[in-house]
Every structure is written in C-alpha cells, then in structure tokens.
Image (spheres, rainbow, N blue to C red):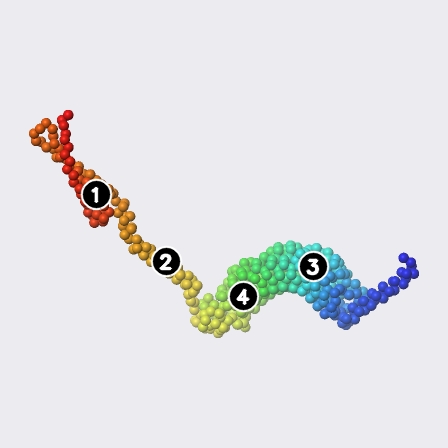
C-alpha cells in the first residue's frame, strides 16, 4: 500500500477512535475518583483515553455487557474497585484484569457465569492474578456447584470477603473453598444446600462471619472447627433438630441466629449456653410448643444471654397460640400427651378389636362344620362281632351256632353316642373230617 494512502488513513482511524471514546465517556458520569457508567446501555467496555489517574472506582453495572475484555485505560494501576453487576456476562477474556495491580473489589454479581465456566482455570488464567483482592462478589450467578480447588489459584491469599449467595449451589465439594487463609466473611445464603460438609471449609482459620441462611438444612450433624467464627446465621432453613453440643468447637461464637426454622422445642444442651462469650441467641419465628420442655427457658436467670429481647411465640397448645413464652408462668407450662402417638395407639387397638370380633364370628358361623371335622377324626365303618355256641347233642358232626353282630357307625348316631347293631345268626356245619 502506498505510504501516502497510509498517512491519510491513520489520522482518520485515530479520529474515529477518539470520537468513539469521547462518545462513550460522554454518557458516563465522572468525578475525581469515580467513573459511573451505570445503566447507559453499554454492550462493551469502552475506551476512555482522557480518564485521569485519580479515578479509583469503575462502575459498569446495569448494562448489556456480555464479554469482559482487557480494560484499555490510561492508568489501570490506579483502579481499586470494579463493578460489573447486572449485566449479561458469560465470558471473561484471559488477562482482563492483569493490569489492575491494585484491584481490591470485584463485583460480578447477577450475570450469566455458570459452574462449568467457573473453575480453577478461569480464576488462574482468565480473571488473572490478584495481589491485593479483598472482596469478590459472585452473587446471583447460577453456579450449581463449586469444583474442588476452585479458589486455590494464586492471587486469592488476600481475599477477606466472598459472596456466593443466590448461586443455586447444591453442594460444596471438599476443599472447594480452601486456601483462603485470610477470609473473614463467607456468604452462602439463598442456595439449595441441604448437607453441611465440615471439610469443605477446612483452612478458613480466620473466618469470622458465616451466613448459611435461606438454605434447605433440616438437621445439623457436624460443624467445622472454625476457631475464629463469631457470627453464625442459620435463619430460614428447615431445621428441626441439632446434634447435641454441635456448637462447642465454636468457642469464639458471640452471635447465633436460628430464626424462621421448624424448631418445636428447645433443650439446653443444644445451645452453647455454658460459653462465656456468646451474648446473642436469636430464636424468633419458630413453631414453638410451649409445654414443660420449655420451662427451663422461662426459669433461666442467666442475664448474659439475651433471650427475652426476642418474641418466642407459641404455636401449641391452642390457648397459648401467638403468646410469648416468656409471658407464661413456669407452672402453666405443662406437658400433654403426644396426640399423634395416641391416635396411632388407638388405631392399632381398634384394628385388633375388629380382628378378634371377626375370629369369633367365623368360629360361631362354622361351628357345625368344625364339629363334623372333629367327628370325622374318630374311627367309623362296620365292625363284626363273632360269637359261637357249640352243640353237644347226638350226632357225628357238631352244630355250631355263630352270631355275627354287625355294628354300623353313622355320623348322626355318633353325635348322640348311639350305635345301630345288626345281628345275624349263621349256622356252620362242621365235620370231623
């Protein structure tokens, strides 16, 4: 290509780039430290050549950005916070944040990032190496699950806050959130977790706040030994039972929230009441059965634990429904029979009675037939009784009179212990020969 032509084209290209950059920057709001491009209809990250080095916050939230490419900024190393929430992001180009060496906050919430794209390689290569990252927000992405070693890549050793709420998480694989030695706050709320794997949080020795609220836990059998944990949220699950002394390893726990679950009664050994550190236990919005099993709670005189600041409304019995358990006198908290067990026992009793009545009716209805079977077991048929009388009269031969008695047994006669006997006299002529 002719040099003269190139000389003519280059200024035009530069002008186009400048115009595009100027147009993009003109729709954004800016002050000394913040570039605010929220809700401006952007589909790509714009090039802003005149951005001063004092700008530390970039906000591209509520746009239509799908691909995050490397930021073309005049002073990328000055950027501390980047907000890309509420876009359509499903792809992060390799090295997109490499030049932001001072980046501390990255918000990718409510995008289209899924579990298959979110793995160790995404963080290690595409998103880049973070030397100073402190807050990572992935809220509202449909991750499904976190694979093993997802956050193990170099660059997250400084992470202090991780938000994985509303990410459609069904499980946390072993070591999926590991090697985050400085993590202090982990938000796993509004997911579908039903089983807590203690090993999945191994290595979080500095974790202080754990939010597991709005999941699907129905029972807690184990809890990680999180030595620094001081706040635990388990609100709005399906918890009906907690393993005895499960909270004992959390010896720095100060606040425990169990609001909005399915607890009906409360036993002292379920809560870390012997801890000298815990000050706040929240038990609101559970269907409490206010009976003798709750008496200890009313009689408890421990002032260090703040129970009475919360409304523990009774669901059962009906006369106490809606009433605060602490407004009921201790002696009025009495136990009633478990109606479900009573109904079950009554049902079994009725079934047994019906069976007995049926057996008696069957025996009475078939009494004659049963007697017939009993009679048939006796020996029956015809029997012959033979008696003979010798005649010592004159004559060479001897006349012998033989009586044969035929005895015939009949069913009806046996019932009346009767016999019919037929006698036949038979003369037999014996000869001396």
Q: Is residue 27 above or below residue 408?
A: below
**Residue 213 found in image quarter:** bottom right
Between the C-alphas of marks 1 and 3, the distance is 108 Å
Provide the residue designation for mark 3: 156
Q: Is residue 184 visible?
A: no
Mark 4 or 2: the one toward you: 2
**Residue 248 found in image quarter:** bottom right
Q: Position of residue 316 (x, y in %)?
A: 47, 69
Disc with the residue nearer the chain's start (4 vs 1): 4
Provide the residue designation for mark 2: 352
> What is the crowding at mark 1: few (fewer than 14 residues within 10 Å), some, or many (at least 20)?
some
Q: Which label was assigned to residue 193? A: none
Residue sitting at x 57%, y 58%: 195
Q: Position of residue 58 (x, y in %)?
A: 74, 67
Q: Secondary structure at mark 1?
A: strand
> What is the crowding at mark 2: few (fewer than 14 residues within 10 Å), some, or many (at least 20)?
few
> Given contact means CB atoms under 8 Å apart, are the residues at marks 4 and 2 in contact?
no
Residue sitting at x 58%, y 57%: 197
Q: Secondary structure at mark 2?
A: helix
Disc with the residue nearer the chain's start (2 vs 1): 2
């Amino acid at each position: 290509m002719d040099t003269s032509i190139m000389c003519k084209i280059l200024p035009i290209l530069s002008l186009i780039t400048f115009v595009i950059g100027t147009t993009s920057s003109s729709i954004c709001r800016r002050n000394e430290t913040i570039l605010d491009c929220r809700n401006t209809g952007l589909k790509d990250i714009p090039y802003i050549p005149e951005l001063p080095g004092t700008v530390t916050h970039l906000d591209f939230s509520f746009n239509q950005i799908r691909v995050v490419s490397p930021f073309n900024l005049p002073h990328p190393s000055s950027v501390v916070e980047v907000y890309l929430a509420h876009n359509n992001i499903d792809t992060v180009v390799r090295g997109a944040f490499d030049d932001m060496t001072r980046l501390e906050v990255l918000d990718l919430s409510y995008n289209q990032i899924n579990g298959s794209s979110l793995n160790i390689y995404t963080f290690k290569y595409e998103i880049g190496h973070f030397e100073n990252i402190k807050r990572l927000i992935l809220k509202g992405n449909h991750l499904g699950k976190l694979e093993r070693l997802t956050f193990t890549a170099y660059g997250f050793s400084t992470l202090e806050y991780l938000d994985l709420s509303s990410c459609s998480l069904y499980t946390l694989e072993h070591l999926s959130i590991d090697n985050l030695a400085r993590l202090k706050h982990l938000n796993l709320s509004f997911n579908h977790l039903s089983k807590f794997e203690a090993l999945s949080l191994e290595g979080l020795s500095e974790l202080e706040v754990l939010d597991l609220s709005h999941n699907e836990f129905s029972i807690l059998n184990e809890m990680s030994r999180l030595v620094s944990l001081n706040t635990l949220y388990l609100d709005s699950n399906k918890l009906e039972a907690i393993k005895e002394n499960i909270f004992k390893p959390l010896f720095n726990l100060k606040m425990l929230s169990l609001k909005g679950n399915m607890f009906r009664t409360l036993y002292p050994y379920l809560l870390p009441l012997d801890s000298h550190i815990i000050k706040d236990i929240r038990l609101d919005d559970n269907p409490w059965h206010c009976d003798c099993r709750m008496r200890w709670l009313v009689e408890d005189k421990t002032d260090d634990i703040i129970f009475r600041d919360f409304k523990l409304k009774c669901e059962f019995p009906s006369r106490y429904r809606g009433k605060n358990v602490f407004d009921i006198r201790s002696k009025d908290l009495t136990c009633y029979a478990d109606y479900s067990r009573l109904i079950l026992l009554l049902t079994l009793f009725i079934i047994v009675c019906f069976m007995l009545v049926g057996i008696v009716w069957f025996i009475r209805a078939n009494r004659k037939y049963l007697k017939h079977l009993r009679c048939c077991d006796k020996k029956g048929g015809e029997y012959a009784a033979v008696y003979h009388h010798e005649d010592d009269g004159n004559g060479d031969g001897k006349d012998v009179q033989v009586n044969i008695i035929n005895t015939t047994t009949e069913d009806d006669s046996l019932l009346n212990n009767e016999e019919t006997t037929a006698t036949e006299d038979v003369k037999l002529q014996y000869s001396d020969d």
